[in-house]
Image (cartoon, rainbow, N blue to C red):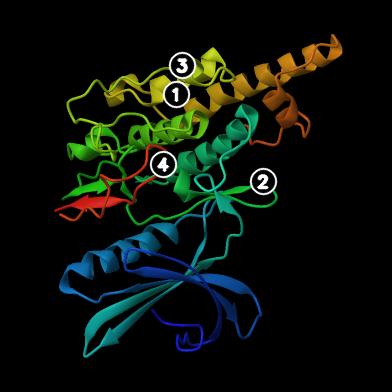
Amino acid sequence: MSTVQTLEVSGYQVVQFLGSGACSTIWRIRDCRTEKHYALKRVVKRHSGDFRFLEQALNEYDVGYRLDHPNLRHMVELRRIKSWLQLKEIHIIMELCEGQTVQENRPKSVLEALRIFMQVGAGLAYINAQGFVHADMKPNNILVGPDGNIKIIDFGQSCPLGTVKQRIQGTPDFIAPEQVQRHPLDARTDVFNFGASLFWTLAGRPIPTTLPSHKSSSLLADLAPTPLDQINPEVPAPLSKLVCDCIELHPSRRPNSMTDVIARMGLIEHKMLRDVQKAQENGKPAAPAAATAAATGPQSPHVDIDIPDILSSEDTAIGPSIQFE
């Protein structure tokens, strides 16, 4: 792997290594002219089978640069690095987003999770309105900043509405049935991924999917999850029902759009805050988690084939995105 000293990016100073993924590394860089800091995703083709990672990086930029929303990471510039006339590297210069992912730091309360996921829903609704499906929504792709604002990251698997993928792409534990079956993808695919992510966030464990990550799961197992309110008693029944609706196996049974999901979440949040206020007025202690989250007041928008070790993940761990040829 390149070091800060050896990696050179014309016009930028490489400041810090931030992390790595499949055939990629992420760096903090500084624009030598404006002094502004950005993130650099560097994707390198080392073997013939790695070309798909270059394609995915090109797709990430092609989709991402068309999108402009406060809850989406902004794409700045794409650079193609060739050697002997062959494409060897992709550099994506993008917005530097500080914070932790939901996978790294799960919300401490139901209300906090609602506020985060309402912002996620606003970003997904915008993506869908622009004619795209994110297609890989999961807790590790939700970045929560120090100010509480969120950024949806990683558009590598995003595609136009109605796309039929040539191979299975997605993340076990969050992938929708139509992704596994290679059927057309639409906004309801994002609704499923969203619901599976919210379930994991509130339950601390994934739903059973048609492509599970853990050894004990079976593709033929009963895919109906235990309702959230039976796992986490702080989850109100309407929210538990909403999540169950989002992760229906058949797209026709899910909410039609993220806008519908956000509207229902807004009503649930309003009811929870009102219940906390009433309890405080009556001198009754509110649920600890609800009281903690309510103390800051409402903040959410009211719109707006290679499988690397996926079968050895822990129950609460999130495996990598996968692709079946």
Q: Callout 3, which amino acid?
A: Lys
Mark 2 lies on a secondary structure that is loop
Which comes sooner in the sequence, label 3 or label 4? 4
Which comes sooner in the sequence, label 2 or label 4? 4
Using a 10 Å C-alpha cutoff, classify the residue at mark 4 as few (fewer than 14 neighbours), some (14 to 19) or many (20 or more). many
Q: Callout 4, which amino acid?
A: Asn
Q: Is residue 97 visible?
A: yes
Lateral position of residue 18 relative to residue 320, left or right: right
Q: Distance of mark 1 from mark 4, alpha carbons?
A: 19 Å
Name the residue located 50 percent from the left edge and 16 percent from the top edge: 229
Q: Nearer the viewer, mark 3 or mark 4?
A: 3
Q: Callout 1, which amino acid?
A: Val
Which comes sooner in the sequence, label 3 or label 2? 2
Name the residue located 45 percent from the left edge and 33 percent from the top edge: 200
* Residue receiving disc 1: 243
Task: Establish if 237 lies above or below 107.
Answer: above
Lateral position of residue 209 relative to residue 271, left or right: left
As drawn, the label of residue 46 is none
* Residue receiving disc 4: 128
* Residue receiving disc 3: 241
Name the residue located 52 percent from the left edge and 20 percent from the top edge: 239
Q: Is residue 255 visible?
A: no
- Label pair 1/3, CB-CB below 8 angstroms: yes
Q: Distance of mark 3 from mark 2, alpha carbons?
A: 26 Å
Q: Distance of mark 1 from mark 3, alpha carbons?
A: 5 Å
Question: Where in the figure is residue 237, as x and y percent of width and height?
Answer: 53, 13
Question: Where in the figure is residue 58, as x and y percent of width and height?
Answer: 32, 66
